[in-house]
Image (cartoon, grey):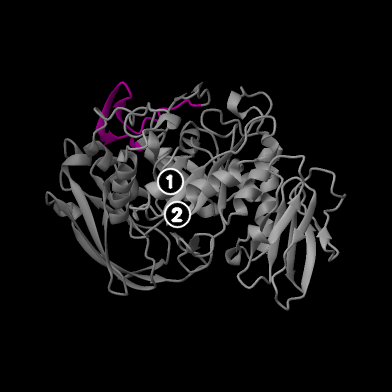
Amino acid sequence: MRRVHAVHEPVELAFTAARDYEKPFVHVRQFAELAAPSGRRFFVDGFHDGGRTWRVRFAPHEAGRWAWRTWSEPHDAGLAGEGALEATVTQASRGFLRATPGEGWGFRWSDGAPAFLVGDTMYNLPGYAHSGHDPLPFLERRLAQGMDLQRIRAHCSSLHRRPPRHSPWMSADVWPWGGIPQDPDFETFNLRYFHTLDRLVQACQRLGVALELICECWLFELPFRDRQRFTAEDEELWIRWLVARYAAYRAIAIWTPGNEYVYYPDGETPLTAWDQRDTRPDRWIARLARLIRSRDPQARPIAAHTMTLPQPTFAQRLAAFPEVDTILFQDWGRRDEHAWTADGLDEAIVQQLAGARQSCVLAEYGYESIDGLPVIETRRHMGREHTRRGAWRGAFHAMLVFAGFENTWGPYMQLDPDAPGAADLVHLRRFFVELAPFASLRPAHHLVQGGRDDVPGAAPRALATPDGATIAAYLPAGGRLAVAWPSTAHTRRLAWFDPRTGALHPAPPTPVLVPPGGPDPVDDWVLLATPA
């Protein structure tokens, strides 16, 4: 009898091999062909899951009859089969994330709705869960703070090399392969670790937490910095394993082949000294993107995570590689005593991303610390004001913002208390999701003038709908605001939005607009002009 299954929910097929294999992860390959109701066909890999068990996971993304068949190389009667299921729309689901460069803010769900995500960076979330800690209270708190995406890495390490930091909370073996880091077996996977990752991904799907799954992070750690031992063949097995195991879950929103990918191939080259003529990092991430795309029926975004580097820009470097459809751009702006302004961030965004053919995100922006943690010197001045202003600057370039906080980044995992700036991001989400039509807003900085002259980076920024009916203007450090209203017949309602509290204050329609409290305080404010 044909089974009934919900659209966008994972289907898992279990198989029992007819015999044992010495190296089941590499000596046997299982494949599945999926026939959608529309007639389109997709191919996914099965994966070994201990003993004689193999599994195939996929998610039907069309309503109607789905047929499947499986086979293996070499042939194993226990791994071959066929069947069908009926996919129905039984619950509301946005579906899977899609990169849509040039449309909206660059992303839509597969049901067509524009996507607005606010992210956080918690690289070691899988290792934290595997060490016996419960991540759900933290994830629920982040959701309440407006952050519904977590940047996590599939591979965890007990040591972060730059700067050197141990992970005292890590009490379990998180090495995802066989053997140990000093004597690895890349033809075997640590199934206990991946069963934990399964449960984490499933919990995130239930909660509504999206995940960016970083396949190789960091490239200056083992094994990724040792390309003599971790070969291209090992890498292909690793990438295919991750996609086969997790592509069926819509909680996986973005694939990132390599975090700070420009450390490829040796893991040692400082970013600031990267040879401008070396295209190997670009070609490498494009190769992995092609591999992921060939095995993922859901066509999720595939991202290159980058930092500001010398010319050529990242937009220029990645122009020849459409396989990479998303740029996760990392920059902080100023990091001196004026870091509270996030000055310089706008210029870096424009300089590195101008003309980009990809959807662009301000990613891993932060890093605000909390009391009691060792301070990385380059982040000493990056506090709550920097967190908030940088997020709003990124949003005023029509970019999603994925933040980062020192206490949840990398090795620390001190999840309570929060960095103060985490509380401010919920107001950013509310503004763009509830008050302003974010998907229709585009950068329109030419419409605004003002700010102040005594604070660096205090010039206003603006977003506007194409018809000029709605305009939003951001004052990073107070002052006065003049708007060149488009010559339309719109009657507008004006209000000041407080990024610190989320409160709205009426604004009288004067030629020069002044935020509540006057022009002298250096508080940031957002003006919202909507049709009356």
The answer to which image quadrant residue 299 occupies is bottom left
Residue situated furthest bottom in the rendering: 489
Q: Is residue 236 visible?
A: yes
State the residue in front, 296 or 504.
Answer: 504
What SS does tag 1 mark? helix
Tags 2 and 1 in contact by the CB under 8 Å rule? yes
Residue at 37% x, 61% y: name it.
59
Labelled disc at residue 405? none
Q: Which residue is mark 1?
A: 314
What SS does tag 2 mark? loop
Magenta stretch bounds: 170-191
State the residue in front, 447 or 401.
Answer: 447
Question: Mark 2: which amino acid?
Answer: Ala
Q: Quadrant of the C terminus?
A: bottom right
Q: Is residue 435 visible?
A: no
Above or below 181: residue 242: below
Graded by Cα atoms within 10 Å as few (under 14), some (14 to 19) or many (20 or more), the crowding at tag 2 reads: many
Graded by Cα atoms within 10 Å as few (under 14), some (14 to 19) or many (20 or more), the crowding at tag 1 reads: many
Residue 62 image offset from top left, x and y in percent: 38, 70
Q: Is residue 392 magenta?
A: no
Above or below 187: residue 165: above
Q: Which residue is mark 2?
A: 356
Question: Mark 1: which amino acid?
Answer: Phe
| Count of picture labels | 2
Residue at 60% x, 23% y: name it.
377
Residue at 23% x, 44% y: name it.
52
* Residue 323 left/right relative to 136: left
